[in-house]
Structure formats: C-alpha cells, structure tokens
Image: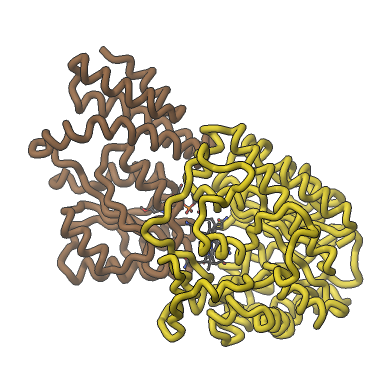
Amino acid sequence: MPDYALMNQFLYEGKAPKVEEMTREALAEGSDVEEVLQEGLIAGMSVVGEDFKRNRIYVPQVLIAARAMKAGMAVLKPLLMKQGAETSTATIVMGTVKGDLHDIGKNLVCMMGEGAGFKMVDLGVDQSAESFLQAAREHGAGIVGMSALLTTTMPYMKVVIDAFREAGMDHVKICVGGAPVSEMFADEIGADGYGVDATDAVDLFKSIYPKDSQ
Amino acid sequence: MNGQRPKRTPVMCQLANGHTIINTGVHPIDYFTDNDLWADCLIRMRELYDFDGILCHKPGRVHGIMDQVERTDYDADIPTLFMDDGSRIECTRDDDVYYKPSAEFVRPALDELDLDNLLSWAPKSFIAFQASKATLPISDPDGFEEHVFGTLDRVIDRVGDDYSVHGEVRAPFDHFLNILGMEEGLMALLDDPERSLKIIDRTTDWSIALAVAQIRRGAEAIKISSPFAGSGFLSPDMYEEFILPFEGRLAKAVLEEGKPIYTHTCGAIGDRLDLLCRTGVSGIECLDPPPLGDIDINEAIQSLNGRIFIKGNVDPVNTLLRGDAAKIKEDVTYILGAAEKMDGFILSSACSVAPPAPPDNMKYMVELCREITDQ
Ligand code: B1M
C-alpha cells in the first residue's frame, strides 16, 4: 500500500519530482489508478485548499502544490483516459469575462478545480458569451465558471447567463466569482452559485455539479 | 509630507491611464508615445480636479520605440502598434497598454537568467515595453540618457513651482515578477529563495537609480508601485523576506536625497502595516477599505500616527466609481474626521481611480476636502 500520507505531504510542499515518482511507484505496485488519484493527489490538494482558505498558506504555496499535482496527473492521465469510457470526468469551462484581463484568481480556481478531480477547460481572459456557449457545448460541460475583477465587467456575467437561457442550455450551472462579486450580486443576476475564493469555488462545484452528467 | 500638519489637507489621486485618456480625449497611441502630450495630459487632469499635486507615474515615454514599429493601426477599436519582431502593443482607448508577445516568446526559467544581465534573453520589443513601464536595467542614477525623463522634466518645467510633482518607480519585486512572469515568479520564491533574493537585490538597484535620478531632476517625492505585496499574493513572512529589505534599501536611498518616499500596496494589507512601516518609508498609499481591502482608517491611524504619513483611502470603486453624492460625502467626512488626529495626511483615492469614474464624483471629493479642511 503506497504511503499516501507522505505523498500528500510532498504535494503540499510542492515537491513535484517526488509526487511524480510516488505516483509511478504506486502504479507499479499495482494500486488502482482511481485510488492513487483520490488518495494520493486529490486528498493532498484538498488540504492545500483548506489551508489557503484559512490564510495558513498563500498564493505561491498553492501554485507549487498545483504544479506537483500536475506532475502526478501527467502520469495518471493516459491511464485515466483509457478508463474514460467508464468514468467520464466532470467538466467545467472557466474564463474571465469580456473586457476583463485579470487572470490570476481564475487560474487559481482552475488549478484547485483540477486538484479536486474536475476537468477544467480554461478559456482565458476577455471571453464573450458566444465563446462560453461554444465551449460548454463542445466539451459537454456541466458547469461554467466566470471570473470578473472589474465593476465594469461584472454586469457581463448576466449577459452570459441570459445567453445560456436563450440557447436553451439551462442545464448548465453557472458559477461566478472575483473580488468585486458578492453572493448578493450572484443571486441578482441569476447565477447558480458564488465562490468567495478558489477553495470555496471548488466546494461549490462539488455541491452543484449536475449529478446526471458526473 | 514632512509629517507635519499643513494648513489644509492636500488632495491628489493616482489616475488609471484609461481615466486620463477618456477625460482628455487624446489618442491612446499618442498618449503612449509622446512625452509632451502626456505631460500636458497630466497637467490638464490636475487642473480638472484642482489637485494639490501631480503624480508623474513614469518619467517619460520610450525614445525610439516607433523605430521598432512595422505598422500602426491607429483607427482600430484597440489601436495597435505592430512591432517588427512579431509582437504587438495594444493601446486601449479606455484602459492601459498591453504587450502581446510573438508566438516565439518564451520567458527564461529562474536558473537560466543571467544575473549580470537580467534582460539578456528578451526580445527588443519586450525591453522597450518594460522600459515604458519604468523597468530600466540601469543601476547608476547618472547612467540614464536625458530623454528618459521627457515627461517628468516637462511637468516640472511647466508647473513644478506651483504644485508638488511626484515621481514613481516600480518596486524591486514588481520588476522581478515582470521578468519571470507572475506565476513563475511567485513559485521561484519558494523554489530557489536564494537566487530570487539575488535577482531582487539587482532590481532594487534599478529602482534606486531611477528614484534618485528623478529626485535630482526635481521630483518632490517618490511613490513605490508595489501592487503584489499584499495578502492577495504573499504571506507576512514572505513580505519580510522578499519585500521589506529591498523596499527598505530603496526608502533609505531616497530619504538620503532629502525627499519623502511612499509605498502603494493595494488590496488587503491589514496584517502587515507594521512590516510596511519597518521598510522605513515616509508614507503609505492606498489602505483600501473593505470590500477591496481590510482597512478602517480610524484603526490604521491609531497604529500609524507619528510613524508614517497616509495617502488614502477613499474607495475607488464603491465610492468614486459607483457612489452617489451622499456616499462620497459620507466617506470623505468620515476619513477626514479620522485624519484630524493624524500628523501627515493626503486625501486620495485608495487604489487608482478607475477609467470610467465620473469626473463629477472626483470634483465633489476635492470640493468636500476643501470645505471641511479649509476652515
Ligand atoms: C466560480 O468562479 C469563480 C470563483 C471564485 C473566483 C473567481 C471565479 N475568480 C476569482 N475568484 C476568487 O478566487 C481567487 C483566489 O482565491 C480570488 O481571485 P482574485 O483575482 O480576487 O485574487 C487574486 C488571487 C489576487 N488579485 C489579483 O490578481 C488582482 C490584483 C490587482 C493589483 C490588479 C492586477 C494584478 C492587475 N490589474 Co487591476 N488589479 C486590481 C487588483 C488590486 C488588488 N490589490 O486587489 C484591480 C482589480 N484592478 C483594477 C483596475 C481598475 C484595473 N486593473 C487593470 C489591469 C491590471 C493588470 C493587467 C495590471 C493586473 C492583472 C494581471 C493579471 N494577469 O491578472 C486595468 C483593467 C484591465 C482589464 N481590462 O481587465 C485597470 C482598469 C487599470 C487600473 N489598474 O486601474 C481595480 C478594479 C476596480 C473595480 N473593481 O472595478 C483593482 C481593484 C485595483 C484598483 N484600482 O482599485 C477570488 O476573487
């Protein structure tokens, strides 16, 4: 049985080569891919999320942990893809809305989402309603996450929500976040959820991911 | 700004470039390339708001940058300079300028950087763009060419006798992040703190040289632009390791020239006010109130009075951009009430004034400040 506690520790400390090595070893020992993913990587990343939320660690620590997670994922990915037919990964399309170029927070949400086992499709910054729609269709996403850092670009989130309604894509849940966004604003524009930070966003994704598409 | 109570509370703000472009009606490419035009914009904005001073947030435009431009799209929605190495510089009509690198652009890894020539890897358009943001790899205050100060010199020439003209430098850590890229730079601090510290030490020399040179040309104060040092980015421990010693060295150099220096760190900084003071700067700008930051001006004054001056802290978003007259009055009255107990205070927007902030809101803030503190 791999030492998952140690693997979690290495991930927390951002030791990418160690995480990669332990992932390979765990597979070589015959551990189940899904188990390595859950116990070795996702469990470690969830401690990172908790500690980030409580200001025990800050953005640089989250970034190196996400990089370590990625190193482990690179080993698992081909195997997970082989299993793809049985276990479809829950997909989330993320982007910063039109007119807004801030991406640091959105990138963190993507990293933490990946760390929690979601397939994150990162559209980048300055994204129009059409590109959110197109990406959600193309990737069969159950959630669309939007980030806005400007008061002037926040209202565009409603434009995207309306576009999804008009396109008959109400089944896609819409989550929003970013420094000026609040729970109240999210309710006002008819979003399905609001994440105050990256950890909260992931908790939100977990709680609202449409069950039938998981 | 010598820590004493002036006869009335001065007021001046840092304006986002987009705010100035919108309110002067100039073309963004001219704004980005023409020293005289930009200097005149800064002066016009002071007149518009009746500020007591002008922040000249870069010393000048980049000499010869147009020699690298292959084609200019002046009329596009986003006017753009197409550079001869395949990169673009987008000069937005209501915001800032942005560098869009060519497809071949790759930043170096931390261990690939040449410590003696930190920009040796960079294409010339990137070097020119960084120069436009005041990242100039020069460590000697006498080592700059005259044209570097084209804007600052003109502003001082035209209005320096009547108004306080402040210069600005990027924080040493800001240069560092701009070389390595945001995420790589933040990770580098943990991957190889020793090498990161060496690089920040070099970039501190750049900030010092430019700050001292600006003082020697007549700037009355220096602002350190340090937006990545708040708790949205670094822990207090990392602040102590990667920011404090270097901004401290910068502060000391400017103070030795006989002028004040203040730091602009936006966002949440409540957990590091003490550390900020320990850099030895004369003042702190921003002190963003909630929700953008976490500072209550009364509490901040209690802990900072006598140690440092404050430039702040009207909420640029909820008050100046979106607020009505009642909200502006409420905030300004509250802040100036608290500032009465303070020995050095400049009324200002906390962070920069957003591009679409209504000019009438700005004028009202200034009017209130005069009304309340002129008595
Ligand atoms: C489900 O979906 C979700 C859920 C949760 C989500 C989510 C999505 N997205 C985010 N979250 C949440 O999780 C993240 C991690 O916990 C958090 O993400 P955040 O993004 O909030 O937090 C990040 C980890 C750290 N925070 C940040 O990255 C923002 C930092 C500050 C300094 C900032 C930066 C860095 C920049 N800026 Co800009 N900038 C400021 C910021 C002031 C400050 N100190 O806060 C802010 C946001 N900027 C502002 C402005 C006005 C501007 N900026 C501009 C430009 C820039 C830079 C390009 C220079 C740079 C962005 C670089 C980049 N690659 O992102 C211009 C606009 C550009 C544009 N069109 O977008 C410009 C107009 C110019 C200016 N500076 O005045 C202000 C916004 C005012 C407003 N609310 O309208 C501002 C508050 C500073 C100010 N002047 O007061 C949560 O919000």
The spot of residue B271 in percent (x, y) is 65, 42
Residue B158 can be seen, yes or no: yes
**Residue at screen point 73% across, 49% down:** B205
Instruction: From the rendered image, report the letter of the chain displayed in brown.
Output: A
Q: Quadrant of residue B18?
A: bottom right
**Residue at screen point 41% across, 66% down:** B86
| A72, above or below B145, in the image | above
Q: Quadrant of residue A127?
A: bottom left
The spot of residue A101 in percent (x, y) is 44, 63
Q: Quadrant of residue A172?
A: bottom left
How many marks can you see?
A: 0
The spot of residue B155 in percent (x, y) is 76, 78
Q: Residue furthest top?
A: A1
Instruction: Tell which of A24 and A144 is nearer to you.
Output: A24
Residue B45 can be seen, yes or no: no
The spot of residue A70 in percent (x, y) is 33, 36
**In this image, B90 relative to B119: left or right?**
left
**In this image, A89 relative to A148: left or right?**
left
**In this image, B126 relative to B8: left or right?**
left
The quarter in which the N terminus of chain A is drawn is top left
| B250, above or below A129, in the image | above
**Residue at screen point 35% across, 58% down:** A124
Instruction: From the rendered image, report the letter of the chain displayed in yellow.
Output: B
The quarter in which the C terminus of chain A is drawn is top left
